[in-house]
Image (cartoon, grey):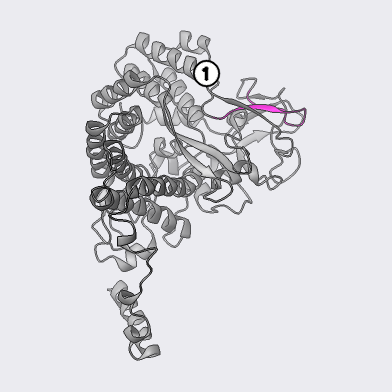
Amino acid sequence: MMKKIIISSLTLLAFACTGDFEQVVDFKDVQNPNLSEESVVGQPNSSTIWLAGLERELGLVFNETLVLSELGSDNYVNTQTFFNQFLDELDMVPTDPDLEDTQFRIHRLREMALFGKNLVGPGDEKYTPEIEAEFNYFEGLSYLFSAMYFSALAQEPLGVPVESSQNYLSAIAAFDVAISINEKPEYHLAKARANYYLGNQSAAVSAANAALALSTTFDRTVQYDNANGPTSTFEAALYGRATFDDLQPLPTLDFLDPKYSFLSPGEDAPVHYLKAEEAYLILAEAALADNDIVAARANLTLLLDLISTREVRNIDDSIEQRTQVSEGSRPDDSSIVVNGRAGLVLDRQSGNVDIPSVSGTSLTPADIAAMLDDDAGLSLLYRTRQEVFIAEGLRFVDMGVKLIIDQNEILLNDNVSEGDLGTTPVIPPFIASVVADLDAINYVPGSGVASTVLNLNDILVANKTSDFVVPFE
């Protein structure tokens, strides 16, 4: 009722100000030949151009999802940056404009994919099966991201919010269509991820194996244009912010930061969002669930072999002081031992540092050889997932946390009311109880040792039988 009162009040206000609002602006009569449907549909090569627009839109999706998901995870602590100030404490409010923008971008990706599939492609005489497959793939990505980050999100404008499990199934259906038209490893991996988070172990394993059968080194990326846009928001957060450096990784992840750094005046660092590493980790986790330690070790060994071939960038990060609020308040020297482990912190003041730009990990062959199919082994696997996928938005999903529908949708969509599924945060109780310490550390400057207050991987594994996390258990 309150929603209708607000909307009615706004309508009355508009008419009170204009007498006849339609006489002021009749949107149906606005004509722009560069933006009309006819300027796209039926034009030569329109499907190729529309696909480029979808790639651009995907970059904008990641500009929203990465900031919220990485700040909401234990990967980074945000104390004073100009990025979202709520998610670091998992404080979700429907008036947060970042939530609105994230939801809008995912919806826009879906609508663009459907428009390409249903109108642009069929109207282009140069439409190819490869582009048709891509349109279905992007539609699937929109459902995948809806499911990963929201407990419920609609699949059409002003539609009824669909719970995450159904969005995952819709994603799988779209990926299947793409695969049937033009098989690609990333299509199979996207399908594997959806099945993984649904807890469909056999289907996830099958799709992961299908992806690796096509390529053992594939890496699908989002590209950013540093000259013409869109630029990478998270590259700015991690590197471009320069001395404004109060976005800090856990000391256990220091050797992986900044994953994105300056490339050239015309190109920002890409986001590697569907890569072969994920397939190996899915297979390893499935093997652990089946108590097959031999297979788990084999897949993790293949993972290390692949990571050893990935790009490592040698960069000057000396401007990064690891100061947070006061100088020297965070570990910033390679001699510092974190949680009893050496080699995790880099000395950025002694020269250039080597940072993995695709995937990095502290996992070693010795770790794999000593690994058992027990909780410690599963915790090690989740530590490896955290490292390999840092700054890619997956840790937040692994934590079982979901964002909420924004206030505009609640007010304007008759199918959504406060308290409905999707309008309240989903935070597992074992996460909610430790939110204040998710990215907290203990460190006395000059002591040579540091520790994280929590080992969240152990917490996830301790709660593996819950419906929130560790989907194969």
Q: Nearer the viewer, residue 324 or 13?
A: 13
Circle 1 Cα neighbour tier, 10 Å, few/some/many (<14 / 14–19 / ≥20) = few
Q: Is residue 190 left or right of residue 362?
A: left
Q: Is residue 420 left or right of residue 358?
A: left
Residue drawn at the location 30% of the way across and 61% of the way down: 38
Residue 53 placement (x, y as % from top left): 40, 49
Examine the rendered structure and indicate whether residue 39 appears above or below residue 350: below
Residue 149 placement (x, y as % from top left): 38, 45
Residue drawn at the location 34% of the way across and 53% of the way down: 107
- The answer to whether residue 12 is seen in the rendering is no
Examine the rendered structure and indicate whether residue 411 appears above or below residue 370: below
- Circle 1 sits in a helix, a strand or a loop, which is it? loop
Residue 101 placement (x, y as % from top left): 44, 56
Disc 1 target residue: 309
Q: Quadrant of the C terminus?
A: top left
Q: Nearer the viewer, residue 38 or 210?
A: 38
User: To which quarter of the image does residue 318 belong?
Assistant: top right
Q: Is residue 241 left or right of residue 55?
A: right
Q: Nearer the viewer, residue 313 or 450?
A: 313
Q: Magenta span has 105?
A: no
User: To which quarter of the image does residue 284 belong?
Assistant: top left
Residue drawn at the location 47% of the way across and 9% of the way down: 370
Residue 311 placement (x, y as % from top left): 56, 25
Q: Magenta span has 351?
A: yes
User: To which quarter of the image does residue 297 belong?
Assistant: top left
Q: Nearer the viewer, residue 404 or 142?
A: 142
Q: Quadrant of the N terminus?
A: bottom left
> What stretch of residues is rendered in magenta?
344-357
- The answer to whether residue 414 is seen in the rendering is yes
